[in-house]
Image: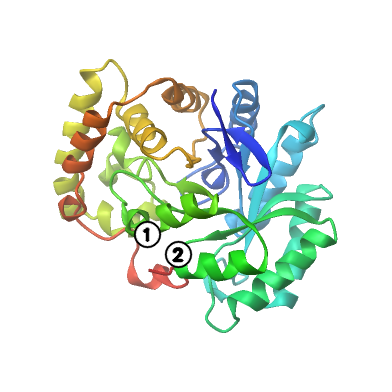
Amino acid sequence: MQRRQLGTTTVAAIGLGCMGMSEFYGPTDEAQSLATLATALDAGVDFFDTADIYGRGRNEELLGRFLRGPGVRERVVLATKFGIVRTPDGARGGIDNSPAYLRACCEASLKRLGIETIDLYYCHRRSTEVSVEEMVGAMAELVRAGKVRQLGLSEVSAATLRRAHAVHPIAAVQSEYSLWSREPEQGMLAACAELKVAFVPYSPLGRAFLTGAIDPAQLAPDDWRQQAPRFEPENARRNRHLVERLAAFAAQRGITAAQVALAWVLCKHPHTLPIPGTRRVTYLRQNVAAAEHALSVAEISELDALFAPGAIAGGRYAAASMAGIEA
């Protein structure tokens, strides 16, 4: 697989988002997830993404078990995050970017992961109660202490990125980006390219909706997508027409809709590192194969027009979940 720059290192162009292995998308199976992680590494995927809130720490513990395998740790670039607070019952409890909190979170993540250094440490969401400069300064102390190698930000504005980068080099910005979530095109992608910061799209498959393989009406009761505006019945019906056209576009080229969606991200922006999430080996292999498919400028333009922002029904999050996401 092609490799792309991530700060001072390089990683495979397609990474793996691990959140769904522990929570949010219905029942989980740790044995299945560990098999998928191993298959990913064998297939050349070496950039793995987690966070302290995923499964309230269980996702980091899962990754920790994987990393203890023979020869695994030195082959993996691991990203985790801090900043979103969860209450003991699992509810979202606000955002905390204070130096004391982020230091405590880092120590807890290191312990759950069973490692000495986090390769990429993100601020998961921004709080207006702590300045960017104070927060990044505290994160930079973790780098100097050897607990973190590189710093990242998630769902921030281009202005915040520039302020942060002036304090300490930022290796990556992670935000939702896909054919149906195009907000980063309004300045963030250009800012990352200018500053030589990798842009890491999460949910590049539209939380699997763009694959055409899921029926929102059949989602498990505890599946987070039940609350997502784009998955509400009327919005899902309208968005389904776009996915059907995407599937036709893919069929004409002998590939899957998911592979087209990933190829669109990779071919449109050479500094992107998409991290599609999956628990299943079959989908993992399909996603990895997307890196082999090049789209022409004309094909990218056709997809841009099909998924023009105004064509998408529903927002990407409910209002309560937009806290900490900067425009």
180 up-or-down from 153: above or below:
above
Residue 63 located left or right of residue 114? left
Secondary structure of the residue carrying tag 1 is loop
Residue 128 located left or right of residue 7? left
> Which three-letter amino acid code belongs to the residue tagged 1?
Gly
Q: Which image quarter is the N terminus in?
A: top right
Q: Which residue lies furthest to the front in this view?
A: 194
In the rendered structure, are the residues bearing label 1 and label 2 in contact, judged by CB atoms less than 8 Å apart?
yes
Q: Residue furthest bottom?
A: 129
- The label on residue 187 is 1
- The label on residue 158 is 2
Q: Can residue 174 be seen in this view?
A: no
The x and y percentages for residue 284 are 50, 27
Residue found at x 72% / y 35%: 66
| Camera-nearest residue between 169 and 94 | 169
| Camera-nearest residue between 25 and 292 | 292
| Camera-nearest residue between 174 and 226 | 174
The x and y percentages for residue 8 are 68, 44
The x and y percentages for residue 50 are 61, 49
Residue found at x 59% / y 80%: 131
- Picture quarter containing residue 163? bottom right
Residue 134 located left or right of residue 28? right
236 up-or-down from 71: above or below:
below
- Picture quarter containing residue 207? top left
Residue found at x 60% / y 60%: 53
Q: What separation in Å lies between label 1 and label 2 (alpha carbons)?
A: 6 Å
289 up-or-down from 216: above or below:
above
N-terminal of the pair, mark 1 or mark 2, is 2
